[in-house]
Amino acid sequence: MNRHETDSWRFLLKKTEMNITIISGSPRHESITIRVAQFLKKYLTEKYPQHQYDFVAMNEYNLPFVEKVWSTANDAPAEFKLLAEKIFSTDAFVLVSPEYNGSYSASMKNLLDHFPKQARKTFGIVTASPGGMGGIRAAQQMQNMICGLFGIPSPAMLIVPSVDKKFDGNANLVDEAFANSIHTFTHEFIWLAEAVKNSK
């Protein structure tokens, strides 16, 4: 076995356990979008149990507008320290956002602005809407935001139109025809996230 082949095997044998944080970006207490985020946490935990999953729901935080970047978890105020620890320990993110006036959730953007660049971390993009477009315009803008964070967006996005007809109030998938889209999104996201983690 030559050196190139040996290095390739070492790459494949590296451990790929990751901390993955799913962020539900809607600040609304009666959010429908959160159903998608909750479903994805259950789905990923079942399909890829080798990884650890955290969940951040923006409707549970009254986060102030950013005044300074929290360079470490210790910089965060006491009430947000556990939140900060989640962000700093995360290897990859799944961002789930509704579409507001053609863009993504401002509360989710405000959260990410409190932290340094998320360089070389993988991001999965998920948007959802009761309408037929599924928040596609928000998804396109999220790609630009992630690049601004120096993150790596997975090109396979999950766009969820008619979200209230695809997921029930208990975050169960009720439209089985949508299962293939979920499989494609999660498979591509995990593949990319593991590849990025292994390359470090």
Image (cartoon, helix red, strand yellow):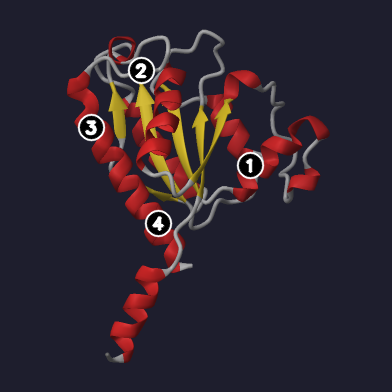
Q: Are marks 2 and 3 in contact (CB under 8 Å)?
A: no
| Residue kind at label 2, given as amino acid type | Asn
Residue that numbered label 1 is attached to: 86
Q: Position of residue 100 (x, y in %)?
A: 44, 18
Give the mark nearer the N terminus: 4 vs 1: 1
- In space, the residues marked 4 and 1 are separated at their CA atoms by 19 Å
Say the numbered circle drawn on residue 194. 4
Q: Disc 4 to disc 2, how far (Cα)?
A: 27 Å
Badge 2: residue crowd in 10 Å (few <14, some 14–19, many ≥20)? some
Q: Give the label, 1 or 2, closer to the camera.
A: 2
Residue 70: quadrant of the picture:
top right
Crowd tier of the residue under label 1, counting other residues whose Cα lies within 10 Å: few below 14, some 14–19, many 20 or above: some
Earlier sequence position, callout 3 versus callout 1: 1
Amino acid type of the residue tagged 3 in the rendering: Ser
Foreground pick, 183 / 108: 183
Q: Which mark is residue 5?
A: none
In percent of width and height, residue 69 lies at 71, 44
Q: Is residue 171 above or below residue 110?
A: above
x and y percentages locating residue 10 in the rendered image: 39, 76
Tell me the residue at 41%/9% (across/down).
169
Q: Give the image location of residue 150, x and y in percent.
A: 49, 53
Q: Which mark is residue 172?
A: 2
Circles 3 and 4 in contact, beta carbons < 8 Å: no
123 vs 96: above or below: below
